[in-house]
Amino acid sequence: MVASGNLSRVIFRLSNKELSGEVTLTPAVWRVLVQFDGTRTVAEIAQGLKLEESGVGQIAETLFRSGILQVAPGSVAPPRPTVNGAFIEQITTELARAIGPLAALTLEDEIAALDEIQESFPRERIPELIERLGQAIPDDARRLKFQQVMLAAIRKL
């Protein structure tokens, strides 16, 4: 999850995307939502409503992830949530069980092929990385086991 304090300089506006399904908002969330007009930052909205910036940031993050808000043109981009080193180490360990000592090198190569770096690998790209790593496992049974273990690990993130 994005640390909501990191959203303080982001400017959001209502999304022009078609939402699927029904959306239920509490009065507190609605009070914040109507403030996102594409001109003020999360910090400015929090200050104007006399609310904690972290609380407004959490609301903004939830609305952004659900497609209700989008980043306004000219705004700084919200930070992408990343995975921690322990999760990368878990990938390496599970991959080593499947392909042996070349696991760390294979992981580095695949991360580089995705134009990312290991220290700040984006969480939303983990499924893509796992799929690419699975293709490096020639044995079908080991590939399936690797993918199952990693799916369980992803669910715990």
Image: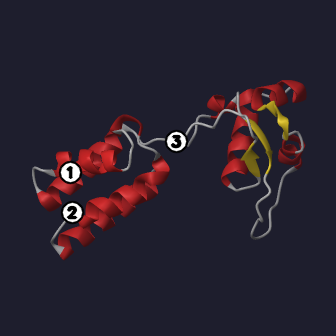
> Within 10 Å of the Cα at label 3, are there few (<14), some (14-19), or many (20+) other Cα atoms?
some
Front: mark 3 or 1: 1
Pointers 1 and 2 in contact (CB under 8 A)?
Answer: yes
Numbered badge on residue 136: 2
Q: Position of residue 127 (x, y in %)?
A: 41, 59
Q: Using the image as rendered, state which of residue 116 and residue 104 is in the foreground.
A: 116
Disc 1 residue type (three-letter)? Thr
* Quarter of the figure that contains the N terminus: top right
Please tell me the numbered disc located at residue 81.
3
Please rate how many residues cluster around mark 2, counting C-alpha atoms within 10 Å: few if below 14, some from 14 to 19, many from 20.
some
Q: Is mark 2 on a helix, strand or loop?
A: loop
Q: Which residue is drawn at 13% across and 59% down?
A: 99
Lateral position of residue 48 relative to residue 109, left or right = right
Q: Which amino acid does label 3 sit on?
A: Pro
Q: What residue sits 32% from the left and 40% below the top?
A: 86
- Residue 14's x, y, as percent? 82, 49
In the rendering, at what x and y percent does residue 100 appear?
Answer: 10, 55
Front residue of 88/73: it is: 73
SS at circle 3 = loop
Please tell me how crowded label 1 is: few (under 14), some (14-19), or many (20+) other residues with Cα within 10 Å: some
Q: Which comes before the other along the chain, label 1 or label 2?
A: 1
Residue found at the far bottom of this picture: 140
Return the mark for residue 106. 1
| 132 or 4: nearer the viewer | 132
